Image (cartoon, rainbow, N blue to C red):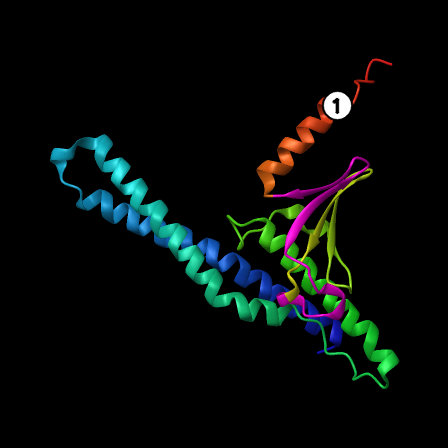
Amino acid sequence: MTLSNSTTARTIGADVLDHLSIVGGVVVGTAVGRFAHARTTERHGPISRLAAGVAAGVAAAALTDSLLATATGPVRRALRDTEPAAPAASRDEARPRVAAQAATDVAYKAKSRWYWSDLRNPAATDDLWQGYEDGTATYYLAPGLYLRFQPHHDDLGTKHSVGWTEQYTLESGEGTTVLSGPAHLLELLDSLDMADPDTTGI
């Protein structure tokens, strides 16, 4: 098997596992829902029986999807890994690799810690986080407007990060504002919209 065919096979295998949790959730949820509907006594009436079946099915589907996704996560990540690169021949060769790892690491931290409510299913636009080798990351919002993530010094541990506390800030022409979360950011964006004159009719 050629390298291209091997990579394709690994990608297909990872895609199959991606869908396994969804299909498994649907199958288990359907079975549990039908079982709950059948076991609910007639005295509760058809609407109550249907509600019990749907509730049991949805709960079982969500739980199964979560368990399967967690169980197959390491295998899916391994299948998507590219072929290992040759070892670096010098420190000059190793440095850009480590710098890229540092940037990837901080971009992941920035997006996962911003979406506290759903770390397993980050939003599609999370790829807009750009990490840097100094341990910070930025998220482009609009021209002249972006988020900045700064990790805590204890988490980063470099000479450059001494005194840092973990925070997200909104950077704009108006200056820097420390954010408490997405709702705070939304409020600031709304206030910026109100401050900008409407030029659509010009």
Task: Tell me the quadrant of the picture where the C terminus can be found.
Answer: top right
Q: Nearer the viewer, residue 125 or 131?
A: 131
Q: Is residue 12 above or below residue 126?
A: below
Q: Nearer the viewer, residue 166 or 142?
A: 166
Residue that appears at 45% across and 54% down: 23
Residue that appears at 26% across and 36% down: 50
Q: Is residue 154 above or below residue 167?
A: below
The residue most toward the front is 163
Compared across the picture, whether 145 is left or right of 19 comes to right
Where residue 88 sits: x, y (%)?
82, 83
Task: Tell me the quadrant of the picture where the N terminus can be found.
Answer: bottom right
Amino acid on which disc 1 is placed:
Ala
Return the residue at label 1: 195
**Secondary structure of the residue carrying numbered label 1:** helix
Where residue 137 sits: x, y (%)?
73, 55
Residue that appears at 21% across and 32% down: 46
The residue most toward the left is 43
Where residue 150 sits: x, y (%)?
69, 56
The residue most toward the top is 201
**Label 1 crowd (10 A; few <14 / some 14-19 / many >=20):** few
Compared across the picture, whether 183 is left or right of 66 comes to right
Compared across the picture, whether 34 is left or right of 66 comes to left
Where residue 102 sits: x, y (%)?
73, 67
Q: Is residue 86 above or below residue 194?
A: below
Residue that appears at 67% across and 28% down: 190
Q: Nearer the viewer, residue 26 or 127?
A: 127
Q: Is residue 160 magenta?
A: yes
Res 89 quadrant in image:
bottom right
Q: Is residue 34 magenta?
A: no
User: For the magenta stretch, what is the residue range?
Assistant: 154-179
Compared across the picture, whether 144 is left or right of 189 comes to right
